[in-house]
Image (cartoon, rainbow, N blue to C red):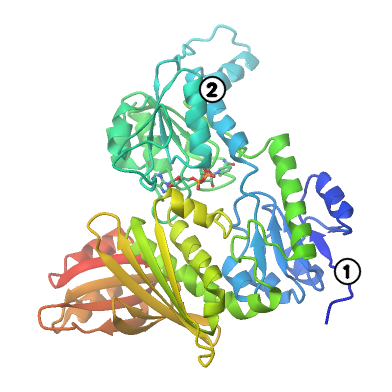
Amino acid sequence: MSDPRPPRILISDELDPAAIEVFRRAGFEPEVKTGMKEDELCQAIRGVDALVVRSATKVTRRVLEAADALRVVGRAGIGVDNVDLEAATERGVVVMNTPRGNATTTAELAIALLLALARHIPRADRLVRSGKWKAKGLVGTEVFGKTLGVIGLGRIGKLVAERGRGIGMKVVAYDPYLAGEGMASPMAGVELLELDALLTRADFLSVHVPLNDSTKNLLSWEQFARVKPGARLIQAARGGVVDEEAVLDALTTGKLAGAAFDVLVEEPPSKDHPLLARDDVIVTPHLGASSEEAQLRVALDIAEQIANFLKNGVAENAVNAPTLPAEAMGEMGPYLLLAEKLGSYLAQRTQGQIRKVELTVGGEIARHAEHLKLAFLVGVLRHSHDKSVNFVNAPALARERGILVLESREERPDFRGGELSVRATEKAGGKAHTVAGTVFGREPRITAVDGLRLDLVPKGVLLVTRHKDQPGVLGQIGSILGRYQINIQRLELAPASDAGAAAHGYLTLSPEPGPPVLEALRSIPAIEELQLLRL
Ligand code: NAD
């Protein structure tokens, strides 16, 4: 039965008014109510079909649970950190973003910061305003002929590299996820290097990686110890990919001659943040995407995408759901989450270096094998990208990364629900990993790893061990974790399959153990392999 009620659209953050025009032209009359607290939003969301946000509104699990008619959340911009994606997927709510809008604007800001650092522009301006015209210490450096090291050669990194070449710089880059033989560069005039080599060569370092578990503190003490003395750093990616304390130290010792931050770990920073006290540091308030053009572009994009979704059911740039009909989405939500978790598991087990995946979908869900494949790829690619990986761009990104995807399905109408199993082969050496899972109730579960039957809830921090199958190992692990006040919430053990083989352990831990704990665990003689996964 079709719903006679016209869909309700709520815009809960400041959005360029041009978006409202787009909605009206499509026959919708959106409601605008900004600045709501969670409680107010929980009230206001009732009966709403589409919610449009930027970054201020927090779309929490509570909000999603209060939403009784919500079908789509649209984020004007890229980052969807303010939306509880897992809760949205569980409830079959599509979350979409606008990944195209910001790249040029952010790349231009990175270049602006680079030139501002080279010529001390903010400090010069401050001195003039304080009455000093010919101030000492403002002699700058030319960028022409200097080397720009781009870390992360994705959408923004590529534009920065291009612009760097445009102002006469030599450009080198580091991005371990790009496909290609050896170190073949995907861009003319840009030499691809290992990180260490880039650090020793670059006069300017510009970081454009996503923030995820593999990039947290990507640049820290160890890396700054290797940089060319007098190098300058531009950080316009996400707070946390650069270790701010290590930057402070590198500035103090003169390893770095300057640093510019558009993003910080703590935003806004406290007044006494040590970076703000330094003359050789520039800080801008997360301005990367703040240009008139970018704001307009993302507002128009999200209005068009949502109107298209409400009218035609097309979920363009969905970060959590492909274009499934609403009824199917309700049933498939937990399976899509499972597929994504299996992707995330394998990406972490292989450090993102997957050459080939073979996906087998069995049971009723095999009808939606194509969507499960997309969800799986999203899980894999979010290891090396951010939340802007979606069901639309995942196949192209996977191809770009040289990942071959094979799929087979066993449609068994007699088997309600279904099972998903995946075999992933690593790029170097061809080592294979397999993982399988299903959904119990509405909860995704991993049911087998490398052929061993298990029952794992893929949620939270998972410590994976390969250890000698002998008495006392678990006791040693438990006592180290206990010493550091880390709780084992769940434990699954698989004994060695035959004599001499390793036993496997899967421990869900809370809170997450830090490096000293892992080091202590690694020192247990019976432990052969240990890895921490975040699922
Ligand atoms: P993208 O996904 O297109 O590119 C990221 C690139 O980083 C990919 O090519 C990936 O392979 C690479 N990468 C991942 N892990 C890496 C690692 N460990 N070492 C080296 N490279 C690695 O993302 P994008 O759209 O170019 O965005 C880049 C960053 O800029 C993101 O962190 C994004 O959140 C941020 N951003 C900031 C602003 C701002 O306001 N300052 C605005 C937009 C985007």
Q: Which quadrant of the rendered structure holds the N terminus?
A: bottom right
Which mark, by number, is residue 128? none
Q: Which quadrant of the rendered structure holds the C terminus?
A: bottom left
Q: Going by the image, does 17 lie left or right of 508?
A: right
Q: Going by the image, does 522 lie left or right of 140?
A: left
Task: Tell me the crowding category of disc 1: few under 14, some 14 to 19, or many 20 or more residues within 10 angstroms, Cα based.
Answer: few
Q: Amino acid at mark 2?
A: Ala
Contact? badges 2 and 1 (CB < 8 Å) = no
Q: Which residue is mark 1?
A: 6
Question: Which of 454 and 514 lies nearest the eye of the viewer?
Answer: 454
Question: Which of 261 and 53 lies nearest the eye of the viewer?
Answer: 53
Q: CA distance from mark 2 to mark 1?
A: 51 Å
Vertical relation: 104 (above or below) 126: below
Residue 366 makes an appearance in the image: yes
Residue projecting furthest to the bottom: 414
Front of the two marks 2 and 1 = 1
- Give residue 334's position: percent from left, percent from top: 55, 77
Q: Amino acid at mark 1?
A: Pro
User: Which quadrant would residue 203 be assigned to in this image?
Assistant: top left
Residue located 17% across and 68% down the image: 528
Vertical relation: 432 (above or below) 439: above
Q: Which residue is mark 2?
A: 116
Residue located 77% across and 48% down the image: 15
* Label 1 secondary element: loop
- Give residue 42's position: percent from left, percent from top: 75, 71
Residue located 18% across and 83% down the image: 497
The number of callouts visible is: 2
Q: Is mark 2 within 8 Å of ligand 1?
A: no
